[in-house]
Structures are given as C-alpha cells and as structure tokens.
Amino acid sequence: MDFKGHGCPDPVIKSLDRLAELKPGETLIVLTDSEKCVELLEDAITSLDLGRISIVKLSGYYKIILERK
Amino acid sequence: MNVRGGYAPKTKIGQFLERYSRLMLIKEIGISGIKKLADTRVAILGCGATGSVIAELLARLGVGFIRLVDRDFIEISNLPRTHLYTENDVKLNLPKAIACANHIKEINSDIEVDPRVTSIISNNIEDLIKDVDIVFDGTDNFSTRYLINEASIKLNKPWVLIGVERWYGNVKFIVPEKTACLRCLLPIPPRDVGNACDILGIVNTTVSLAASIAVSEVLKYILKNEIGDSLYVIDSYRNEVSKIRVSRRNDCVTCGQHRFELLKVRVGRARAVCGSRQVEVFPPKPVTISTKDLSRIRSDEIHVVNATEYVARLNVADGSAELVLFNDGRAIVLETLDEEAALRMYDKLFNLLAKQGIVQFKT
C-alpha cells in the first residue's frame, strides 16, 4: 500500500484494516513519508498485539513490513 | 483483533480507530492510549451536574466501562446546570442514571454502560466500586464524599473529589497510599447544611470547568501513571484556577490508620435525605415493582400522579403525603423529616401493592 504524500492518520487506519484481512504469517508492505504514521503503526502493532513490524528508512520515505499474528 | 472494554469484535480495527483518529494523533495518547482508555472501568457516583459532564467526556474518550449511579430522577430545575439531559427526559420522568446511560450510549455504542438507580450508602458502596479502576464523585454532599473516601481507601481505588457551588469549585485527585485523602484535607467533616444545588445554586460553567479538570487529572493517570497531588480551586467568575499542594497526614483516621467508621454504619430502612425535607425508605426485602402498572391500582388511598417503567409519583393517604416510588422498591417520601411516619406509610403502601400483585420478590 503506497501512502506517500498522504497525511496521517488515514494510512494507519487503512493499513490496519488491510492487515486484519490477512491470514496469520502473511505480510503487508506499507510505504509512507509520514513519521507520525510510522510512530502510530508501531504503537498499534505493539500495544494491540497485532503482529510484527519492521521499519526500513529509505530515501524520503519509509518501507514498513507488517506481519499478521 | 479486538480491544477489551466494549470494542465490538465485528468492527474492523481500522473502523474502531477511525472514531479516535484525531485523538490518537496527540503525542501523550497515541493508539496505546486509546487502548488504555478502552480497558479502563470507572464508576460515576451521582449523575447530576458534574456527573453528567464527566459521563459525556469519558464516553467520547472511549472509556470502556462506565457505571452510572444515582438515586434521583430528572427535574426541570436540573436542566440549566446539567449536560446531556433534555426536556423530554423530564417529561418521561426518567431516573438520572437511566437517562445519562441512554445519552452516552447514543454518543458511543462501543462502550459498556451500567446504570444503577440506587442510593449510595454504606450497605452498597463497596459493591458499586469494587470492580472498577477509578471512581468519580458526582455527589452534592459531604456525608457521601466521606463514605466514598473510606470505601476507596479500603478497596485501593483512586477517586476524584469534585465540589461545586455558585461560581466556585474544588477538584482533588486522591490515590490511596500516594496522595492526601479527603480526611487529610478536612479531618473534621463539615456539616451538610443543605443541597448545594438547591440552596446555593450552581453556574454551569463552573461545573464544566471542574469536571474537565477532574477528567484531565484521570487521563494523565491512565495514560502516564502521573499522579497530581494538588487541590484545584476554581473561580469561574474571575476565570481563575489555583493549585494548592496538600500533604498526607500520618495521623489521618482514614488513609493513615485505616479506620473505616462510616462503612460500618448500616443504614436502616428509613433515613432522612441529607440536605432536604425528604425521607428515603427501602423495601423490607429485595423486590421489583412494576411501577408502570400502578395506574391500574384500585384504591381510595392512592392516587397515581404519573408512572413510568422506572418510577412513579403517588399521592397517598387522602393526598396529605406525596412519594416517589422506584422500581427497585425504594421510595422517597416528600416534605417530611419523620422517618418513623414515612416508614409506616411506606409499609402500608407496600402491603397494598403486594396484595395486588404489583410487587415481585427477588429470590
């Protein structure tokens, strides 16, 4: 899901809804240039115990890999 | 994927968070804060002026479980100082706890709301707060506040003291073993000289200010475990709020010595209601009274003024006495201070209703 250029929190909500549709072990890749979205996705994954999150900082945006628990 | 505290599993997590999408942008809240709020259970004791504002704020914040306790019903004179309530609630003669529950469920149907139409007395206060995390004071008298203080210290429940009259208010967050309690603040309970709302009046801006400070203190506690130990003194006429640091007293009877004198006093079947010319009477056994069926009673001694499923207003004994009868069998006899006479009148009425099948005894 490519959310580059989109302001927070819309990408967070859409990503979490998509993640909920995945089967355990499946992954979702989210691209965003919003640091707030990165912070909130990390917060959501850990506090709601939804799965695992990996964050890769690329040139001007972040690649986030979400793995469904 | 769901969150405890009333989050409906059928709702997608994103849809659930959509409601709080602006709240979660706040650094101190975030999504973990939304979850903490959904996991929090509170009791609001008294659903009048301050209680109704607090209920609305907490429901909008998504606090997952809200118990609403109030013995009274809504009257037209409540509307200038309360939140939520409407003329229609007055017309329907609704108890405050029920009307408050109806309105906050309209605001947020994801949360669990538990209305209790009952008095707050030593016999029931521990049951009312034992399964919640935080207690809010929405009462209007010191007698009940000292009782809340004892029960909260005994059961280790943080509570917020809120007092409002005219343009002035006080708010103090009390955390057992951490902060000063009400008895540290005022070792000798002041005498209740009347219902502050009726005797002194209340400006609704003071109520909103005091309730907002109370909820903010609790928010910081839920989110960051921060404990404010100041007494807030509010003057909404001058729009000034000052903070006074209050220290714990080692010799405090309640939080220092853990002597819970008020909790030991069992309330009898009849008691004069603090600050008013009313006597509250409790039924001899736990019962349910179908108050809405009272209008079919055939008796020269009872005239039903109005009746709903929760409460009925009756004239009894040739119209010389008026009482309000709740569906849990409790009654408030108006314009009297004579507890014995009120109990005699109630028992006569109760027996009459029992004979006519209006009273169901709980097993």
Image (spheres, grey):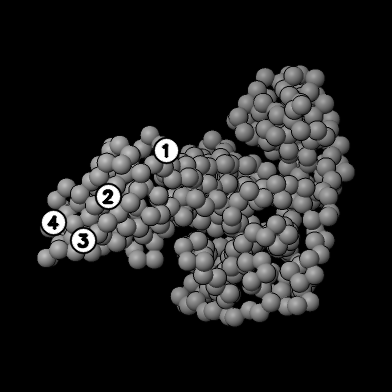
Examine the image and state in which quarter residue B174 appears: bottom right
User: Where is residue B24 shown, x and y percent of the image?
Assistant: 34, 58
Pointers 2 and 4 in contact (C-beta within 8 Å): no
* Element assignment for label 2: strand
The disc label shown at residue A4, or none: 4
Q: What is the three-letter code of the residue carrying label 2? A: Leu
Badge 1 marks a residue whose secondary structure is loop
Kindly indicate whether the residue at mark 1 contacts the one at mark 3 (C-beta within 8 angstroms).
no
| Label 4 chain ID | A
Give x and y (percent) for residue B18: 30, 48
Q: Which residue is tagged 1?
A: B8
- Residue at image position (76%, 72%) is B256
Q: Position of residue A57 (x, y in %)?
A: 19, 64
Classify mark 1: residues with Cα within 10 Å, few (<14), some (14-19) or many (20+): some
Amino acid type, residue under disc 1 in the picture: Ala
Residue closest to the eye, B282 or B167 = B282
Towards the viewer: B313 or B67: B67
Mark nearest the camera among 2 and 4 is 2
Q: Is residue B310 left or right of residue B183?
A: left
- Which numbered dot is residue A56? 3
Q: Are marks 2 and 1 on the same chain?
A: no
* B158 lies above or below A24: below
Estimate the spatial distance between the alpha carbons at disc 4 and disc 3, rounded to whole Å.
14 Å
Q: Are marks 4 and 3 on the same chain?
A: yes
Using the image, name the chain to which the residue with label 2 belongs: A
